[in-house]
Structure formats: structure tokens, C-alpha cells
């Protein structure tokens, strides 16, 4: 009986042990499966978030790049002839983003806003005005627009009519320049009244008259 009872106890212990081992294996497999599922879910969420962030960054970059543009003139300068003493007016329109910086030049010399030269901007319209044209205003005028992406330019010729004509209208005709200075030359009087002619020459700080 003792042997029978011992064998029965051993059998029950083995059965219980096998049952416990089976339950532990089942629980372990279940935990491993849950961990693998959670890990795969987390990896999937991270990949989705990463792809979403990359997509947003790329979309944002395209949006910014799409708003930027090189400067370009939609209305260019036009060459013109202006009578001496009249107004020179040059106009052009420029587009670009960021807003272009605009500079004016005449024969390579930069022009600045001053009493004699007016430089205006009204949105995309840029204007250069010289109120009174003189001989030294003749030349090639250039407008240059630039921003962080590049630059563009437009040019035009301005001719001053009558600026190079000779002094054929008599002794009272004198040509001026932008500085307002009188030209220096020898006064030659061809008249009977030498005194009047001499006074005119001395008041202009010129050489004494040569009477013919």
C-alpha cells in the first residue's frame, strides 16, 4: 500500500509539475506574443510619425521655395530724347521675392536721391526724375535690381537735344552744366562799343576783350 500510495503521489506530482510547466510555457508564449505585438505597434507608430514629420518638412520647404523668385523687370527702361532744360523721367517695374533692392546708375556712376535727382518707389514701379536736363546728363542709364537669389538690370540711352550746339545765337547765349558753372573762353568783341563789351567780359572773369 505504501508503494502504491508513493507511486500515486509521484504520479500526481509529475502531473501537477507538467501542468505547471505547460501553464508557464503558455503564459510565457502569451507574454512574448503581446510584447512582440506591442513592439511592432510602437515601431509602426514611430515610422508613421517620422514619415509624417518628413512630409511636413518637405511640404514646408516646397511652400517657402515656391514663394521665392529672382528679380525680373516686367517693364523696362525706354531710351528718350529730351530738350535741354526739360525734365528727364525714367520708369521701370520690377518683381521678385524677397523684395529686390533697386539702384540707379548713369555711365557706371551710381545716382542718389538729392535736390537735382529724385528717386521714387511706388510698389513695383521705380522712377528716376531729373527736373532740368543739362549736357552732362546725356548717357546710358541703368537700373539694377537684386535680392538674395540673384539680380537683373535694364538700360536706356538718354540724349539731350541742343546740348552740343555751337554758340551761334550771339554773345548772350551761354551753355550751362549741372554744376551751373560758366564755360571759360576768350571774349572777342566785334562791335563799335568796346566799353560795353569789356564790362561784360570782366564781370564773367574772362580774359580782356580782343577788339577787331
Image: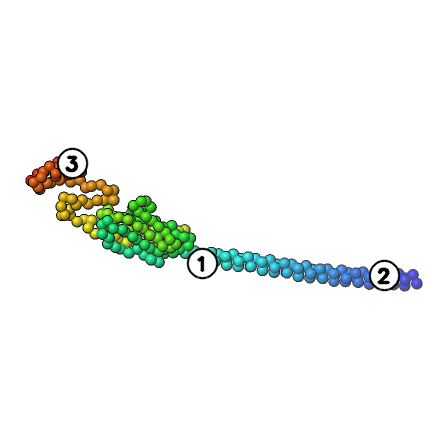
Mark 3 nearby-residue class (10 Å; few <14, some 14–19, many ≥20):
few
Q: Can residue 182 be seen in this view?
A: yes
Question: Which residue is the site of mark 2?
Answer: 10
The residue tagged with tag 3: helix, strand or loop?
Answer: helix
Q: Distance between the residues labelled 2 and 1?
A: 82 Å
What label sits on residue 66 in the rendered view? 1
- Residue lying at 88% horizontally and 61% vertically, measured from the top left: 6
Question: Which residue is the site of mark 3?
Answer: 202
Residue 203, image x, y percentages: 17, 37
- Residue lying at 93% horizontally and 63% vertically, measured from the top left: 1
- Residue lying at 42% horizontally and 54% vertically, measured from the top left: 97
Question: In which quadrant of the rendered image does the C terminus lie?
Answer: top left
The residue tagged with tag 2: helix, strand or loop?
Answer: helix
The residue tagged with tag 1: helix, strand or loop?
Answer: helix
Is there a contact, CB below 8 Å, between mark 1 and mark 3?
no
Which quadrant of the structure image shows residue 156? Answer: bottom left
Mark 2 nearby-residue class (10 Å; few <14, some 14–19, many ≥20):
few
Instruction: Say which label, 2 or 1, has the lower sequence index.
Output: 2
Of residues 168 and 62, the one nearer the viewer is 168
Instruction: Say which label, 1 or 3, has the lower sequence index.
Output: 1
Count of marks placed on residues: 3
Amino acid at each position: 500500500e505504501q508503494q502504491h500510495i508513493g507511486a500515486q503521489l509521484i504520479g500526481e506530482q509529475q502531473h501537477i509539475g507538467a501542468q505547471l510547466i505547460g501553464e508557464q510555457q503558455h503564459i510565457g508564449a502569451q507574454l512574448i506574443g503581446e510584447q512582440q505585438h506591442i513592439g511592432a505597434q510602437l515601431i509602426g507608430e514611430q515610422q508613421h510619425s517620422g514619415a509624417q514629420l518628413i512630409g511636413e518638412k518637405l511640404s514646408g520647404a516646397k511652400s517657402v521655395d515656391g514663394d521665392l523668385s529672382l528679380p525680373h523687370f516686367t517693364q523696362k527702361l525706354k531710351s528718350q530724347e529730351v530738350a535741354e532744360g526739360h525734365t528727364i523721367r525714367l520708369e521701370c517695374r520690377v518683381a521678385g521675392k524677397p523684395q529686390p533692392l533697386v539702384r540707379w546708375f548713369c555711365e557706371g556712376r551710381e545716382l542718389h536721391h538729392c535736390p537735382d535727382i529724385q528717386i521714387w518707389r511706388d510698389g513695383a514701379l521705380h522712377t528716376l526724375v531729373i527736373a532740368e536736363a543739362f549736357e552732362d546728363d546725356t548717357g546710358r542709364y541703368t537700373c539694377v535690381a537684386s535680392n538674395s537669389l540673384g539680380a537683373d538690370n535694364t538700360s536706356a540711352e538718354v540724349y539731350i537735344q541742343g546740348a552740343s550746339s555751337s554758340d551761334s545765337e550771339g554773345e548772350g547765349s551761354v551753355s550751362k552744366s549741372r554744376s551751373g558753372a560758366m564755360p571759360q573762353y576768350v571774349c572777342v568783341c566785334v562791335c563799335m562799343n568796346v566799353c560795353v563789351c569789356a564790362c561784360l567780359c570782366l564781370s564773367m572773369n574772362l580774359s580782356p576783350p580782343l577788339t577787331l
